[in-house]
Amino acid sequence: MKKVRALVLTGYGLNCDYETDYSLKTAGADSHRVHINQIISPASLQPKNSLDPYQILVFGGGFSWGDDHGAGVLMAAKIRHHLGEELSSFISEGKLVLGICNGFQAMVNLGLVPAFGMKYRERTVALTYNDSGNFIDTWVNLRVNNLSPCIFTQGIDTIELPVRHGEGKFFAEDERIGRLLTDNQVVLTYADRMGKQAKGAWPANPNGSLGDIAGICDPTGRLFGLMPHPEAYNHFTNHPDWTRKKECLSRKGKVPPSGEGDGIRIFRNAVDYARENL
Amino acid sequence: MPVRLEIRLKKELLDAEGYSIKRKAKEYFGYEVERIRVIRVITIEAQLDEPQLERIRDDLFTNPVTEKSSYSPLAEDFDWLIRVGYRPGVRDTAGSTAQEAVEDLLGITFREEEAIFTSKLFEVKGDIQKECVETIAKYLLANEIIQQWKVISKEQWDPLIGIGHITPKVIIAKSPSVSEIPIESDEDLEKISKERNLALNPRDIPVIRNYFLRDDIREKRKKMGLDLPTDVEIEYISQARSDHCNHNTFRGLFRYRDLSTGEAVTVDNLFKTCIEAPTLAIQKEKDWVVSVLWDNAGVGRFDDDHLYVITGETHNSPSNMEAYGGAITGIVGIYRDPMGTGLGSRLILGMYGFCVGPRNYAGDLSPHLHPRRLLDGVIEGVRDGGNKSGIPTPYGLLLFDESYLGKCLVFVTAMGIMPARVTGRPSHEKAARPGDLIIMCGGRVGKDGIHGVTAASETFSEHTPAGHVQIGDPYTQKKMHDFLIEARDEGLFSFITDNGGGGLSSSIGESARFSNGCRVDLDRVPLKYEGLDQWEIWVSESQERMTLAVSPKNIERFMELSRKHAVESTVLGEFNDSGYLRLDYKGKTCAYVRMDFLESEFPKWEFDAEWIPPVLRGLAEPVITEPTGYGAILRTLLARPNICSRNWIARQYDHEVQGGSVIKPLVGKNRDVPGDAAVVRPILSSLRGIAVSQALCPHYSAIDTYNMVANAIDEAVRKVIAVGGDPRHLGGVDNFCWPTIQFDERLNPDGKYKAAQLVRANWALRDYCLAYGIPLLSGKDSMYIDGNLAGPYGERRRVSGLPTLLFTVCSVIEDIAGCVSMDAKCAGDLVYLLGKTRDELGGSEYYQMLGYTGANVPAVDAKRSFQSYQLLSSAMKKGLVASCHAVSRGGLAVHLALVAMAGEIGMDLDLGAIQADKGLSTSRRLFSESAGRFIITVSEEGQEAFETAMSGSPAALIGRCVNTGSFKLRRGDEIVMSEDVMALKECWKGPFGGLV
């Protein structure tokens, strides 16, 4: 089978690299954790890694540069400054980019999403401070927009994942929110436990995101950013209710949950797509 | 001329930070403010031209979607303006990342005198007096120890000038110098000790003098150009001899006397007899105990290929002074211990324990920080320290008591994991070898943290030096952590330890013991700013630094990796086998001390310990007739601060990062009731897990500290077993926090009693660790949890904290799929109570609620209990248990209610069915805090198998889960209470439900 190579960025305060790498491997990728400096390559560092051999690039979670000047801001500046052109060709070759939490914040600041009109440098939306004013760790219910071109969420209708952030409120001018919706670039929205749209209500919408937006993609669906953490649902025991589900199902004579968590599906979609198309 | 960039959120966006300050102003002080909005200020003191300034404004510091910014003042439409910025020398992380980004973007390097500083402006709108604005500035926004503030009125404001240019640079107009210390007499040295705040023990003084007056030593020193001891040497010795570093109290001699029996016994060294001896005995029996009692943390076996590392400590004094800074420094600091254990481990989790005064304290005393503000600060400190380190914080405790007004307790605990072998060598072993280079890596050295160790060894007073407060920097440390793990895996160093208390003096001093000597060039130490004296460089506790030994053949690769990770590493000198610790500054020797000096000849500390048994102290059981309003008592108990929900804390902490969360801090149907223990899967490709829990029971100390410790150990053990922990693998960590035990007629008249309390606590530690087979993998002691608080009449009152032990238990779980949570699962399930309920309400929450202490403190029958824990554990392994919960503070009624509330399910239970003392009254059945008990639910089909598995244990079937939503307790036919489960939950969530 064709090998799909994935690159997970590390260093400078990023921190979800081990589990993101594990999730990609579980999904079938040949995944590598690579320090940012190794690809932006100051002359003193050898060997330099190039983006070229990879089909999937992941900006993972964490606190890049401590996040004191807005989440993902300095990360985006560094990448734009040192990797701008390489990244542009990566994208134009039709390869996949995933940004999770801090990585989503960085992608938004880079302009990789939503990239209206395929303009991959324009900052048009933002992720800003949660309405609560505080960091929150909680599991959320998410609805997937089936009309979105997003590669990563194909075949998924709803999914539960944890959010863990202080700056996850999706914000943009009304007109841009409207455009995201009509162009089906809104991929994930926060919902309540019954799967109904959260409509801004806390805690189903944990941060006050406009339009309950939790994740968006570029017009091609190959670049995807989301606040929730799919890599943190890599095993069934990650789910907050697994001990309850296990008991309830076994009482009914059904098979209790086991194996992978649902978050892996997002990575598998990417790996499968890359294998077939890249 | 510096320039000032101001940045603010656009008007249409909610300013969440400003809003939360407005809310706190109302909550803390009752001030009604119309609006508060925040302006971020970046002050740039560097030679940048106009286009460069515009470029960094656009590309780095302004989000065009949400923010506007300007190099001219932005403040408008306010009544008052508050500026808050750091004091000179305080770590400004945002300032240094800003500088890093500017340098990178513009391709320039700042000159020595150039820098970027961050500060904030707060626009306050509202009809409010200047004094009130100052209160907000002083008590909500700034902490005067590390920050400076200024209030400007609308009238004073000049929109052209703005706030002015404030650059908090450290300028020390003196060159570094070494001074000699006179040691003509003991009095001389004692005077110096007081003046320099060295906290030298008077009995150490003659030993120090004798050393420096010895002919052979003087001869050798003369050859190095030294005569009298230098300040570097005296500072070094005082650090090394401090109670914090040397554990003089635990290694001391105790003359213990029981005042009722007259029985007297001399205890030589609590550490040796109660910690070391039992741990070594247990290590012989348990092959999973890998490395204990010598390194920065203890090491246990996780599986054939991995070892886990655990340790815990406290950061009380600094947190008491500056809650946020103290707590973040505490949590980030404890993470360096596993990093510096063996050849270094990767951090996998952190935990917290906060003991503070009542959140709504309104009494006579004025603590340095009000408990509410202090608690907010420590919560936020641990939040930023843990979250920004990428380490999950899945467990923690919070306890309120007025005794902690004197000094709060901030416990931090950390675990790491490492491969069992690193390039073929066992990873838990390390040694600095002669010829190895001494490397310091991570942060730089400044004046911060000087004399932290000696301050922690003293009672808090208005003279405590403020300089020891600092702000931990998780970002710098995370970079260093990633670097060191990579360097470890390449086998690039032979020794690693952290710079904590005592700074280089203790990290290099201790590591040089392995090679038996070292030579250091103090002038090579990278400094934050010029002007530090040699002794300051040597003892500074500036954070985020590790000390390593690297062989010269590996140094090139080591430095290359260091650059890749953007971490500063510096060669400071080399280890040797000279038998001397030698420090040079620009070629001149300023310290030359024999390596064996600190191990020799110092007199033991001695304590008189007088135990006054509870009866002699007048403690007795209260006289209370049987109440009738059982339901009302339960509702009241559930809303008490030490029982009620504190979910707002756990939710601020990232407990899922690293992707291995198995049992979370909050569990149950609505994920809102605390789990007994946390379980994580540290190696994602393995099904093995680590379970960990903590317990503290200081309220029992009012009766007998022996029982306090016994109950803390038993509770922590049960909580770990309740989630599926293995009773054959229980690793312990003991963290003692004790008031001053040295008797002083005037200042500490009950010191002898407090000393006896410490002895008894240690006896219990020894007895119960042996009984349960718990090696003490790690532990720390923090004495002096006292404070002298201002009262309303110009007096100061001594407040001593309750003698407190935080006990941590960890275990390895073979298959996490067998883990169990505490919430009741399904209607129809059977409810069991394991363990006997006795007349043991002394020190209980119920008695406390009624204003009593009582006398019958719970006793732990370790032998019987442990047998039933083993049975329960095997029943759990067979999958027979649907939920399991350890009964602790509050007693049976509270904990049955928690199990029902977590499952959001009713219960119908018979209190007559429990195993109890004969004739035990209903209220005692409900509220006794007897140890050794579990609440267990089992499916109907599992009944027979469960009862067979538990046969011979005191497990009693007491009722069932029902889907009526009603929590119904009977005693035979008589209804004791019938409460709505969701209504109970509302009571329980009530007190802190509004906090986020």
Image: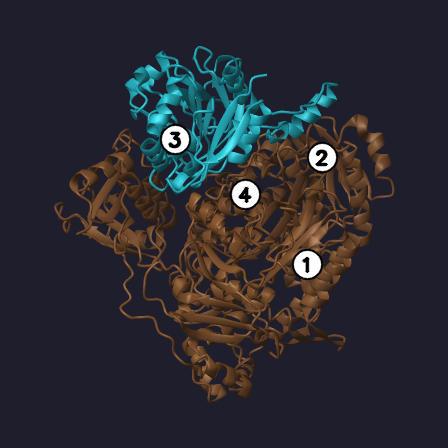
Chain colours: A cyan, B brown
The quadrant in which residue B743 appears is bottom right
Q: List x then y, in percent, for residue A231.
A: 53, 29
Chain name for mark 2: B
Q: Are marks 1 and 4 on the same chain?
A: yes
Disc 4 residue type (three-letter): Thr
Q: Are marks 2 and 1 in contact (CB under 8 Å)?
A: no
B40 relative to B269, above or below: above
Disc 1 residue type (three-letter): Val
Residue beneath disc 3:
A105
Residue beneath disc 1:
B709
Disc 3 residue type (three-letter): Gln
Q: Give how far apart the Cα atoms at labels 4 and 2 are.
A: 22 Å
Closer to us: A186 or B950? A186
Q: List x then y, in percent, for residue B403.
A: 53, 61
Q: Give how far apart the Cα atoms at labels 1 and 4 are.
A: 25 Å
Instruction: Tell me the element at label 3.
Output: helix
Observer able to see residue B640: no
Q: Give how far apart the Cα atoms at labels 4 and 3 are.
A: 23 Å
Residue beneath disc 2:
B815
Which label sits in the foreground, 1 or 4? Answer: 4
Residue with the most extreme front position: B553
Q: Are marks 1 and 4 in contact (CB under 8 Å)?
A: no
Instruction: Tell me the element at label 2.
Output: loop
Q: List x then y, in percent, for residue A155.
A: 53, 13
Q: Give how far apart the Cα atoms at labels 2 and 1 are.
A: 31 Å
B336 relative to A166, above or below: below
The quadrant in which residue B243 appears is bottom right
Quarter containing the C terminus of chain B: top left
- In the picture provided, is B990 more to the left or to the right than B625? left
Which label sits in the foreground, 1 or 3? Answer: 3
Q: Which mark is residue B393?
A: 4
Instruction: Tell me the element at label 4.
Output: loop
